[in-house]
Image (spheres, grey):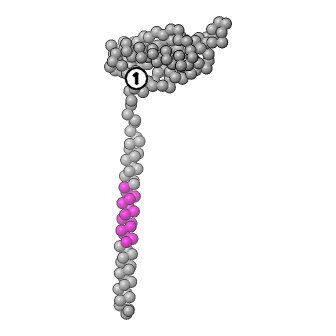
Amino acid sequence: MNEQSRRTISLAAIAAIIVVSAYLCGVSAGQWLGLNARIEAAESRADLPPAADPQRYLLVADNRSTATADLQTRLNDGARVAGMTLSRTNFEAASDDDPLTVFADIEASGTLVEISAFLHMVESTTPALIVETASLRPLRDSDRLRLTARIRARLSPGARS
């Protein structure tokens, strides 16, 4: 092998190394740009608020009477599961200005543990209800307490009448 052929082989090897290096740099840059685009897309999706599920926040029913009956069933079941006695439930609309809000005024009796379990159920299960006010009084000759509470619920827009 003469000097000229060694030079040619060396130049060809260097050229091959340069071509392969350029190709690998291009592939790496393409992957980096693709990853950057995916990160930006994920960040823009994260900036969007989650779609609101009306069943998480509203009593969904065809009319106010059905929604009120569903709310009464939920309160009765919650009191029963907690071991409480629900003695009174009154419902009233908030006002003419806000026809989608209904209030439930309740009286119930139970132990402190039962009452706290009931109130936790009211505020933590769906649809979301809000305990506006609550007061506890001891019952005579008993270890039980009387709960008087006002609970607010929002109705779905279809439950206007």
Type of residue at label 1? Leu
Q: Which residue is label 1 attached to?
A: 58
Residue 157 in view = yes
- Residue 54 against residue 136 in the figure, above or below: below
Magenta span includes 32: yes
Q: Which quadrant holds residue 118? A: top right
Estimate the x, y position of residue 123 in percent, counting from the top left. 50, 23
Estimate the x, y position of residue 84 in percent, counting from the top left. 56, 15
Toward the bottom, the furthest residue is 2
Query: Where does the C terminus fall, quadrant-wise?
Result: top left
Q: Is residue 136 left or right of residue 151?
A: right
- Residue 28 against residue 103 in the figure, above or below: below
Estimate the x, y position of residue 107 in percent, counting from the top left. 53, 10
Residue 135 in view = no
Q: Residues within 10 Å of mark 1 (few under 14, many from 20)?
A: many
Query: Where does the N terminus fall, quadrant-wise?
Result: bottom left
Q: Is residue 53 left or right of residue 83?
A: left
Give 138 or 46, whichever is nearer the viewer. Answer: 138
Give 100 or 88, whichever is nearer the viewer. Answer: 88
Q: Going 58% across and 12% down the picture, which residue do you hit? A: 109
Q: Going 37% across and 57% down the picture, which residue do you hit? A: 33
Q: Going 33% across and 18% down the picture, which residue do you hit? A: 62
- Mark 1, secondary structure of its residue: loop
Q: Going 48% across and 25% down the picture, which residue do you hit? A: 125
Q: Please provide the residue range marked out in magenta.
A: 20-34
Estimate the x, y position of residue 18 in percent, counting from the top left. 37, 74
